Amino acid sequence: MARSADGQCRPSTDVLVRTRDLTRTLGEGDAKQTVLHGISLSISRGEFVALTGASGSGKSTLLYLLGALDRQTAGEVWIDGVEMGTLDDDDRARFRNERLGFVFQFHFLLPEFTALENVILPIMRRGSMSRSAAEDHGYEALRMLDLEELYYRKPGQLSGGQQQRVSIARAVANDPAIILADEPTGNLDSTNAEGVFQIFGNLAREQGLTVVMVTHDTDFAHRAGRQIRLKDGRVVEDTTRDVPNRS
Amino acid sequence: MSQTLAALRTTVFVAMRQLWERKLLNGIATGGVALGVLVLIAMNGIMLGFQEKFTSAILKISPHVTLFDTELRPQPALLQRFTGGLVSAQIAHESPSERQSQIKRPYEIVRALRTIRGIEAAAPSVAGTALLEFGGKTKSVDLRGIEVAAQDRVTPIHQYVKSGHLRDLDLSSDAIALGSGIADDLGLHVGDTVHAASPGGKPLDLKVVAIFEAEVPPVDKTRGYTTLHTAQALLGRTDSITRIEIRLEDPDSASRVNERLERTFGYDGESWQESNANFLGIFATQDMVVRFVIGAILLVGGFGILAIQIMIVLQKQRDIAILRSVGLRRVDILLIFFIQGVIIALVGGGLGDVLGKVAIFYLGMLPVKSEGLVKSETFLVHENPAFYVWGVVFALIVGIVASLIPAFRGSRVEPVEVLRGQIG
């Protein structure tokens, strides 16, 4: 992996994400509130993890910390051998671009751009390939999600399920190490939700992608390879199940 | 591909697309800038058009430098210099001298002047006020006694003669050339004889041989020319020369030349800028007012960009969050809004240039009768390519300054805060 020059990197080759005493407080003074209390966990490559918990349990905050979008108050977050706390703002942006893929509840596509353009934006930013190569790559990602015929449409011309699949294509197309999804099914009907869940499962099983998904849906949580349940900023349950077809 | 180039390409791609997809808002911002540039070009065109016309009118009919018959004060006495202004005696009520002032040895001065480099022509003349009477009407004129050929080289009057011939002045001792305004007022035509008189001089009947119209109303309505001798007799100033008028190769050097001539010859002189200081002063004020107006309009254009961009930044928090989450840095977000501001300014500036060009064209054809300082049938519009350059330059400055605040604001958007707000 590109960024393991740190030396302090954990020796395990299989562990992709590791947190130690991860703490996050929000607000100041009397409004100060500890959202995460010393979370320590590790996630291996290829795992499909469901983060669950009630509203305000800190699951989204944990996801943002794993996604280098937020900064911890104390503790460490290692992703792919890099401790996020040591990176400055620009380095984190670059890290997100090259190593992470995000899927959000409200699809979060840029309305002015076509599906394909939305998908290739992270690749363009990375600058690792020409525009036409990036388009081929993005088209491939759309095809994988059965969207190849809609590549020219703008988000406004797509259904909610289609939009969410486009945003998954965007997350996947730039070859990330981890996909971080924040309630990706929360805004979809059950059919589309099931479809999106299946896609994540396949990405983890067939492509060895690590997927961390925040969800409210207990069914999905049970069917994921691993469920981590948070309550009041602490891990109260961490179950790994045998998932069929796992290579 | 380098990171920087990839970042730049992405920001330009996003900036252009967002700009294009918000045609109405950005069109309004662009229109505001274009309007500012249009006003800049049109107002400058009108102002300069009038001023240039006025200046060229002054320069065609007025001498560049005039030496008068007032001797510059001699140096203060030696004693006075030491005592710091205290003198032993002072005359309490000095009665004015009867002796009329005049330039001493004027022809030697004129000859000397003609040898000085930078001086194109010099002509001696006598000036005074005379009353003209014709058909029961009287009118006071600013009478100039001139050497026709020499004066014509300094102020080319013959170019503006409407009827008659200026050279006929030299043919008879009782001829006069008049401005068209005087001729109209008195109902005179070439060939008419007018009665002229001045206190202290000899009344004469003068025959009108030429009527000129320089299209400078102050001259056309007051000026009359006769030969030197005729004027000297009429004004009662035999053999006097009261002014020497000078034409320079470079009119802009008039002040400098005037100072040198004053020092050399010891007579009070005046450059054309000094003679017209009142008008030039008005122009300076006018320029200031116009610049103020232009500045205000460009400022309003800038606020247009500012308001619309701020609004877009606030509306686009989600998009900013998503761009940041896929790896755009703060500086990339800043650049997106900055590029948009600059493009709005450039397009607005270009559009303003085109509109300005059209406005200049039509203003130049607009019939406006002007009879004040200069005579004209249409708006006097001056077109200077520099206006167009300045229009774009100012638009750009305004665009850059106005988009800085929104761009900075956009770059401060924290993706987590947006996501948290959305998802809870």
Image: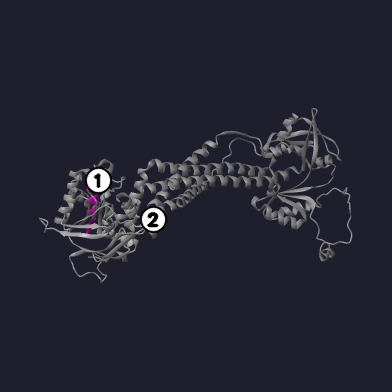
In the rendered picture of this protein, how many numbered marks are placed on residues? 2
Which residue is labeled 1 in the image?
Answer: A187
- In the picture of the structure, the residue carrying the numbered disc 2 is B412
Q: Residue B374 in the image: x percent, y percent?
A: 65, 39
Chain containing mark 2 = B
Q: Which residues are magenta?
A: A163-179
Instruction: Compute the Cα span from label 1 to label 2.
Output: 28 Å
- Give the residue at the far top of this rendering: B135
- Whether A64 is drawn above or below B37: the answer is below
Looking at the picture, does residue A46 appear above or below residue A151? below
Q: Main secondary structure of the magenta part?
A: helix
Foreground of the two, A57 or A128: A57
Would you say A112 lies left or right of A204 here? right
Q: Nearer the viewer, residue A232 or B7?
A: A232
Which residue ends up furthest to the front in the rendered image? A30
Left of A104 or right of it: where is B18? Answer: right
Q: Residue at x 55, y 35 (%)?
A: B365
Which residue ends up furthest to the bottom in the rendered image? A7
Tag 1 near tag 2, CB within 8 Å: no
